[in-house]
Amino acid sequence: MTFTPPADGRTTPSTDVPQNSAFASLAREPLLHFLLIGALLFAVHAAVTPSVSKERLIEVTPEVRQSIIDLYKEKHDIEPSKAELTRLIDNWILNEVTYREALAQGLDRGDDMIRERIMQKMRLLVFGNVNVEEPTRQQLSEWFEERRAQYDVPDFVGFFEVPFTGPEAEVQAKATLQQIESGSEPEEVRLRAQIFADRPKPSLESSFGKTFVDQIAALPVGKWTTLQSASGWHIVRLDSFVPGHAVRMDEIETQLINEWKDDRARRLGVATIRDMAKAYVIRRGEP
């Protein structure tokens, strides 16, 4: 504190505070020193470290490191040594460089196998991050009713069949049937016969047609006859018929929940990829 002489000659203390006193006090604060040093280090680091774009950055993240360790343990039943881990990480970096350079040079273009593997990896990433909650009772019931046909137990049909094709197929089939009915079954019947034992009716319909399978299912068990299908004529004999039945939801509830969640995850994953597509200008090339 300084003193200034008054006009009357007496000496009195001055009430003015020096301008640099506050700065001097602040300069002695340790926190300020810490902040200044931190700012200086950051500035130096920024000056000597060039900025790196994401496309040019290869980073061994903790997740990547752990994945490398896990793969080694799975193969060798022990964790890699420090030297071994360093070698494995070096290999991973070289592989990543090779992969990125291949993409940069367009080597994936025109190679369907590489393209499919890259797409599959992206799909796993997208669908692996999809979270699906348990369905409500109403959601599960509605989903089940929409797909009931694929859960109900179908009719099962078993039959014996001998095919005939060509312009004389009908004549040959009927002549052979007469021989069978008379007890003189030709050798060719046994050689050409096909036996379908207890097959689901829908799977038979996809091969022979619904009309043909319906006709077989309507036959008396053990009855021989000739029938025509889209592929020709046949001698057939119904061996067994087990009628199907409707399935109750509670009988397969666990299966339904799993399949509902799989379907929901697929829909959400597709929606995520569609959202990604909004970032692109898409030209379909349609006339």
Image (cartoon, rainbow, N blue to C red):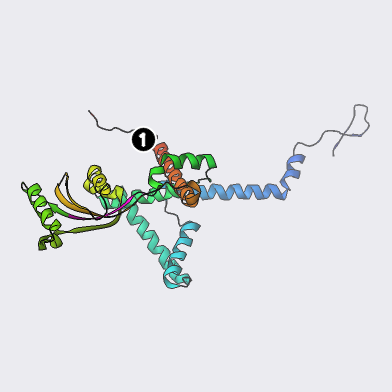
Q: Is residue 75 visible?
A: yes
Q: Quadrant of the C terminus?
A: top left
Q: Is residue 149 above or below residue 195?
A: above
Name of the residue lying farthest toward the front: 182
Q: Is residue 155 shown in magenta?
A: yes
> 148 and 34: which one is in front?
148
Give the residue at x 24% y 30%. Answer: 286
**Residue drawn 38% across and 63% down?**
91
Q: From the top left corner, tell me how far across and down residue 233 is, in percent.
A: 14, 48
Q: Is residue 270 above or below residue 107?
A: above
Instruction: Give the class, few, some or many, for how many residues have Cα within 10 Å of label 1's Cα (few <14, many ≥20).
Output: few
Count every numbered label the image shows and give the total.
1
- In the image, 144 versus 224, the foreground residue is 224
Which residue appears at 25% of the width and 47% of the height? Answer: 213
* Quarter location, residue 3: top right
Task: Using residue 73 as the reference point, say whether residue 41 is left or right of it.
Answer: right
Instruction: Report x, y in % for residue 110.
Output: 23, 47
- Closer to the camera, 147 or 32? 147
Q: Provide the secondary structure element on which disc 1 rests.
A: loop
Q: Is residue 232 left or right of residue 238?
A: left
**Residue 219 location, x and y as percent?**
25, 49
For the residue marked with disc 1, what is the amino acid? Tyr
| Closer to us: 210 or 61 | 210
Span colored in magenta: 154-161
Residue 107 appears in the rendering: no
Furthest toward the left, the residue is 167
Residue 88 within the magenta-colored segment of the rendering: no
Q: Residue at x 19, y 55 (%)?
A: 161
Q: Quadrant of the N terminus?
A: top right
Magenta stretch: dominant secondary structure:
strand
The residue at which mark 1 appears reads as: 280
- Where is residue 114? Give x, y as percent: 29, 52
